[in-house]
Image (cartoon, rainbow, N blue to C red):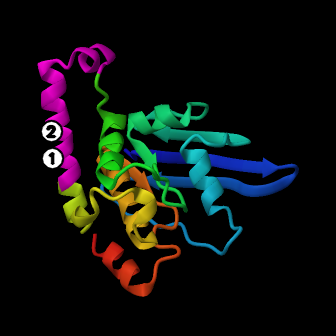
Amino acid sequence: MPILELKQVSRNFKGLAALNKIDIEVREGEILGIIGPNGAGKTTLFNIISGFLKPTRGEILFQGKNIVGLRPDRIAREGLVRSFQGAGLFPLYSCLTNMIMAHHLHHPIGFWQTLIHSRAYGLREKEVKEQSLSLLKMFHLEELKDMAAKDIPYGNQKMLGLAMAMASGARILLLDEPVAGMNPSEAMAMAGQ
């Protein structure tokens, strides 16, 4: 059974068909690419799958459930996360803080646990910090962990955005032009991940 299935998904903008009857099946563990020139509808497709746009018609099933009409944050919590053409960071916060916030998307800490700094809160924060540091190391960003995201090179910002998407615990990652704007050595480093 596919983990993600699009059935006859279409999107019109004032009479212009940006997407027309798209059928896609994605199975667990598959790596697929959407290829086309600028303006072909790739980002529109990602926006529809992730809930930022609604299709004009069609169904989107994720893990067997129709997700059309769900808010993007709800879809992300279900395990379908997308990156953006821009890095999508919290620019004033450190790389480590960006990673910690990404972890909390999938495993939030309750309000009362946070307020009273319960034992569960302390253990969870320690675990999240360790996982965040591990992902920063995997993406060769550990030396930048204390720098504000806006102050690191663009290629590193794109890698941080991908690391954040991975930190969310997603079952599916939709990567929208993950190496756009990178120089060749940055793109090769990203491909090695």
Q: Is residue 84 left or right of residue 106?
A: right
Mark 2 residue type: Glu
Mark 1 burial class by Cα count in 10 Å: few <14, some 14-19, many 20+:
few
Instruction: Give yes or no for contact between labels 1 and 2 (Cβ–Cβ under 8 Å).
Output: yes
Mark 1 residue type: Glu
Q: Is residue 86 left or right of residue 170?
A: right
Residue 164 in view here: yes
Residue drawn 17% across the image and 31% down it:
124
Q: Secondary structure at mark 2?
A: helix
Residue 155 location in percent, x, y? 42, 72
Which quadrant would residue 116 be assigned to in this image? top left
Q: Residue furthest right?
A: 15
Residue drawn 60% across the image and 39% down it:
59
Residue 46 location in percent, x, y? 57, 53
Q: Is residue 101 above or below residue 69?
A: below
Q: Nearer the viewer, residue 149 or 179?
A: 149
Residue wearing tag 2: 127
Q: Secondary structure at mark 1?
A: helix
Q: Is residue 36 left or right of residue 124?
A: right
Separation (CA) of disc 1 from disc 2: 5 Å
Residue 10 location in percent, x, y? 70, 49
Which residues fall within the magenta stretch? 110-133
Q: Nearer the viewer, residue 114 or 4?
A: 114
Disc number placed over residue 87 in the picture, else none: none
Residue wearing tag 1: 130
Magenta stretch: residue 65 in it?
Answer: no
Residue 28 in view here: no
Residue drawn 35% across the image and 73% down it:
190
Q: Is residue 45 above or below residue 106?
A: below
